[in-house]
Amino acid sequence: MKRLFTLLLAAALLCSVLSGCSGGTEGSSAGQTQSVETGSSEASGENQNTGDGAPDISEHITLKYYYLGDAPTGKAQTALDALNEKLGEKINVTLEAAAISWGDWTQKIPIVLASGENFDMIYTADWAFYFEQGAKGAFMNLDEMMPAYAPKVFSMIEERDMIDHLKVNGNLCMVPSFTKEVETADLVVREDLRKKYNCPEIHSYDDLEAFLTAVKENEPSMFPYAMSGTESAPLYSALQYETDWARPIVGGDMGIITYKMDEGKEVFSIADTPEYEAFVARQRDWFQKGFWSKSVLSEKTGSLDQFKAGTSAVARSNYPGIRNLYVQMQREQPDWEISFWSLEDNLIERKAPAGNGTAISINSKNPERSLMFLEYILTDEEAYHLMYNGVEGVNYALTEDGKLTRPEGVDPSENIGTINLGMGMNNIDLQYPNLEDWDVAHEKETELYDKSVIPALAGFTINNENISAEIAAIANVLATYKVPLDMGTVDPEEGLPLLRQKLNEAGIEKVIEELNGQISEYNASKKEA
């Protein structure tokens, strides 16, 4: 009976793997279909259960993981070596950390996934091709495997009601990170300058304008708000602050089609709203007042980097960025004082379950052991800290009350951090608090998280088969006509009607009609489930 159970389980897992996250759709390429069959058959041969139902880990294997960040060197390599020693003892694997740099990820990830390469795991997210590549069959279907090989993690996903938001074509294809983050658009402010010029505390756009004006009049070596030409801050910050809209689902943060965050019943064009009309009017006014560069559209350096360099009095960031900035400025600019303004007074967007995580490649020969690895990392405290923080005394130290700090005698300018593996394997319940963390920002994020909501369409995937040409045309229109409006470089009296005209010519009404039909089907399927 045990042998029969083992064979039945292996057969069930094989069928699950073969289905992939593409669900057998026509979107998968011929090359992907072939790699599904090859990878699945080899995987089922390598990871048989033992006679008592326990996974067989007698063979030592290497798991290759693609992540976003820099290749490990120096003390980062020390951390990886220590982690691999522990992984060898516990689950008989070695982790091969393969870096994809931040500058290359948008181009390289699709290439890696389409190549048919035999690797095991990859960082993914809703903003890093999870739904797009999952729909093409790039990731394994984990519906049957995860309860068998990562039962604790599967229980965590169920307890947090994350499954429906992680599915692609009805299948679970990601092991998510477990965090408590909110998607905010916050402005960091040089508080010392605000006090120096006796400006009011910033709680509104009128307060912000008073500060920007004071900086413009008194600090000739800096811009009040030194934005780059691709910075999404103006639209994302202003319109989410004043509305209950979700982030745009067509065109990214600088996009044009969105929906009401808590409803998710239909989409609409931002360009047709009075809110956007008021926004571009203010942007034009602030541009003409010189709050940012006249050549902003060609500016490559973002506000956060310019803030650090002392050439901008305001910068856009999120809460993790704000806390990191605080730590950095405490070391590098101890005479500065910084504050921040959280712009969301309406609905707060909780980071979607698919916001950070790890997927298993459809070409992996080791999907079961990959799940065992993720289970071990996300539930074992010692393994988690080796992966996330490194080696105590080398990469980090702990205070008497259990807070993270730098090892004694380490130069503050020396980079002792681990590689960026932790972004896709995060469990907030296992993290140490940081001694240098900005308690004010941390407390504000916690406050906002408690009243935040997961966007209604967080798990919705656009099928662009019938509208791909229109979406491409809309993207060109946004780059040519909308970005200048967002940055205030054109007169809205002329630029906004032209934007609307060009969007109509690009087929935005067809896209909206198609998406609303897909959303109706998506919502109906959720009710049936």
Image (cartoon, rainbow, N blue to C red):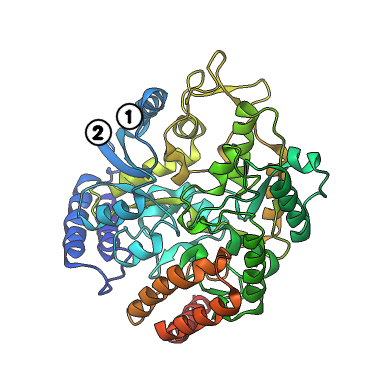
What amino acid is labelled 1 in the image? Gly
**Considering only vertical position in the picture, is 161 above or below 6?**
below
Q: Secondary structure at mark 1?
A: helix
Q: CA distance from mark 1 to mark 2?
A: 8 Å
Disc number placed over residue 60 in the picture, else none: 2
Q: Is residue 47 left or right of residue 448?
A: left
Relative to 390, does residue 499 appear above or below in the rendering?
A: below
- Vertical position of residue 276 compared to residue 73: above or below: below
Viewer-proximal residue among 303 and 381: 303
Q: Residues within 10 Å of mark 2 (few under 14, many from 20)?
A: few
Q: Tell me if I can see residue 154 in this picture.
A: yes
Sequence-first tag of 1 and 2: 2
Between 33 and 42, the residue placed more toward the observer is 33
Judge left or right: residue 329 versus residue 424. right
For the point 67% across and 20% down, the residue is 400
Q: Position of residue 410 (x, y in %)?
A: 53, 16
Residue located beneath label 1 in the image: 88
Mark 2 belongs to which amino acid?
Answer: His
Question: In front here: 490 or 200?
Answer: 490
Q: Are marks 1 and 2 in contact (CB under 8 Å)?
A: yes
